[in-house]
Amino acid sequence: MKQIVLILMSILSFSCSSQTQRQATDTTEPVSKKILVAYFSCTGTTGRVAESIAGAVDGRLYRITPAEAYTSADLDWNDKSSRSSVEMADEDSRPELGGEPLDMKDYDIVFLGYPIWWDAAPRIINTFIEAHELKGIKIIPFATSGGSDISNSVKALKKTYPELDWSEGKLMNGMDDVDITKWVYELGYYGW
């Protein structure tokens, strides 16, 4: 009888320790991340994409707002003296930010959205990056465009801010909510 009790205790002890070990090593559950979806949009196109991304990742939506709003005349890329043309011609241009302040310590991941201007990110994106501490935060660029790809804008951002953790980014033209959700799942950021 004593031998049976010892065998049962050994089996029970082994079963409990392997269950504890299995629980400690089970990493199939994704880790919860704090996500910001920051975007600049003048016409609403990039804003609609940003809203969809924020919904897919359950992230906070934040509009990057210039201190002085852009008018349609400011956005006339055919006019070399328009505000956007002048800003994009000057690599050192940093349009002033408006809007509410952000504490980046609250975030692990930032989806950073913008329209493509002159095959680059608008200069206000540089202002946003330089105004916030983004080291240690994963940055995932996304963009909309009338004719350019995102690759040159991401390459320029990586070159200007090499100390930041950049993802390759994605051009979002023509993507609907289903496509956007699929994209964020493909990135591996699921279950947030």
Image (cartoon, rainbow, N blue to C red):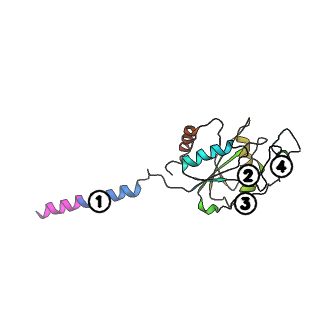
Mark pair 3, 2: CA separation: 10 Å
Circles 4 and 3 in contact, beta carbons < 8 Å = no
Magenta stretch? 1-11
**Mark 4 Cα shell of 10 Å, populated few (<14), some (14-19), many (≥20):** some
The reply to whether the magenta stretch includes residue 80 is: no
Q: Earlier in the sequence, mark 4 or mark 3?
A: 4
- Whether residue 168 is visible, yes or no, is no
Mark pair 4, 1: CA separation: 66 Å
The residue pinned by badge 2 equals: 125
The residue pinned by badge 3 equals: 131
Q: Earlier in the sequence, mark 2 or mark 4?
A: 4
Tell me the element at label 3.
helix
- Say how many tags the image has: 4
Residue 73 position, x and y percent, is 83, 43
Residue 121 position, x and y percent, is 74, 46
Is 50 on the left-hand or right-hand side of 16? right
Q: Quadrant of the N terminus?
A: bottom left
In the image, what residue occupies the spot 82% across and 40% down? 77
Q: Earlier in the sequence, mark 3 or mark 2?
A: 2
Tell me the element at label 1.
helix
Residue 161 position, x and y percent, is 72, 54
Mark pair 2, 4: CA separation: 12 Å
The residue pinned by badge 1 equals: 16
Q: Main secondary structure of the magenta part?
A: helix
Residue 87 image label: 4
Q: Amino acid at mark 2?
A: Ile
Q: Residue furthest right?
A: 81
In the image, what residue occupies the spot 82% across and 53% down? 93
